[in-house]
Image (spheres, grey):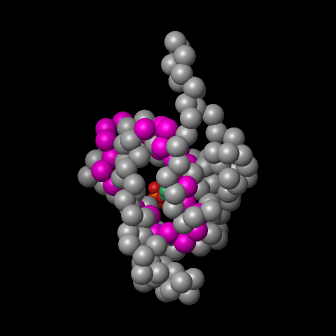
């Protein structure tokens, strides 16, 4: 898996609307899913994220609305900006990536599929930017 990759998801349409299937460990989600979480109710002037994970793999899908996700890889690589404005756009995050979510449109709902359980006792996020850069340099 790349550090960050925009993938196209296929929605099935008929006269009743759309159905968008995601097969874990399959074509759309290239890892076993251990956790799903949703984000909603974001004010448009707030940001979320601002941290990195050491090695958690995630698929982010903006089910409704739109969000911009800035992905900072450290390692001397340019920051990439992804606008998720359709449920058929999925953002795969595959490693040490500093992510920031901003510019939420009203009513935005984001679903995230992750390959790890969340541990409040031993959180795996790196929330200090300098620490993230230092880990990213080690991986460069
Ligand atoms: C990420 C971006 C895209 C839980 O209890 N369980 C969970 O599975 C998660 C993800 C979070 N939490 C708790 C931890 C905090 O007390 O929920 C609270 C808010 O989490 P956080 O501030 O990390 O949320 P975001 O929106 O800044 O970041 C989230 C994910 O945490 C993160 O892994 O990649 O979305």
Front residue (pair 18, 38): 18
Residue 6 pos. (x, y %): 49, 52
Which residue in the rendered view is the most extreme toward the left?
45
Name the residue rendered at 39%, 54% in the picture. 82
Which residue is pictured at 59% across the width and 73% down the height? 54
Q: Indicate left or right for 6 with 55 as reference.
A: left
Residue 109 lies in the magenta stretch: yes
Where residue 51 appears, x then y in whole percent?
46, 68
Residue displayed at 31% across by 38% down: 106
Q: Quadrant of the N terminus?
A: bottom right
Q: Position of residue 68 (x, y in %)?
A: 36, 52
Q: Is residue 113 above or below residue 70?
A: above
Above or below, 140 relative to 100: below
Residue 35 in sight here: no
**The C terminus lies in quadrant:** bottom right
Q: Is residue 21 visible?
A: yes
Q: Position of residue 113 (x, y in %)?
A: 61, 49
Q: Is residue 133 magenta?
A: no
Compared with 47, 3 (above or below) is below
- Taking the spot 55% from the left edge, 30% from the top edge, the residue there is 11
**Residue 116 lies in what quarter of the image?**
bottom right
Q: Which segment is the magenta one?
A: 86-112
Above or below, comparing residue 113 to residue 75 in the picture? above
Q: How many marks?
A: 0
Q: In this view, which residue lies farthest toward the top?
A: 15
């Amino acid at each position: 898996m790349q550090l960050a990759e925009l993938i196209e998801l296929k929605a099935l349409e008929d006269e009743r609307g759309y159905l968008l299937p995601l097969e874990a460990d399959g074509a759309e989600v290239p890892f076993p899913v251990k956790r799903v979480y949703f984000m909603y109710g974001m004010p448009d002037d707030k940001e979320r994220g601002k941290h990195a994970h050491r090695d958690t793999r995630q698929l982010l899908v903006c089910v409704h609305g739109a969000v911009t996700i800035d992905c900072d890889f450290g390692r001397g690589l340019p920051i990439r900006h992804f606008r998720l404005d359709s449920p058929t756009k999925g953002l795969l995050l595959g490693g040490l990536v500093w992510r920031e979510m901003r510019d939420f449109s009203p009513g935005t709902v984001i679903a995230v599929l992750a390959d790890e359980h969340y541990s409040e006792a031993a959180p795996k996020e790196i929330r200090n930017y300098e620490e993230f850069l230092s880990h990213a340099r080690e991986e460069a």
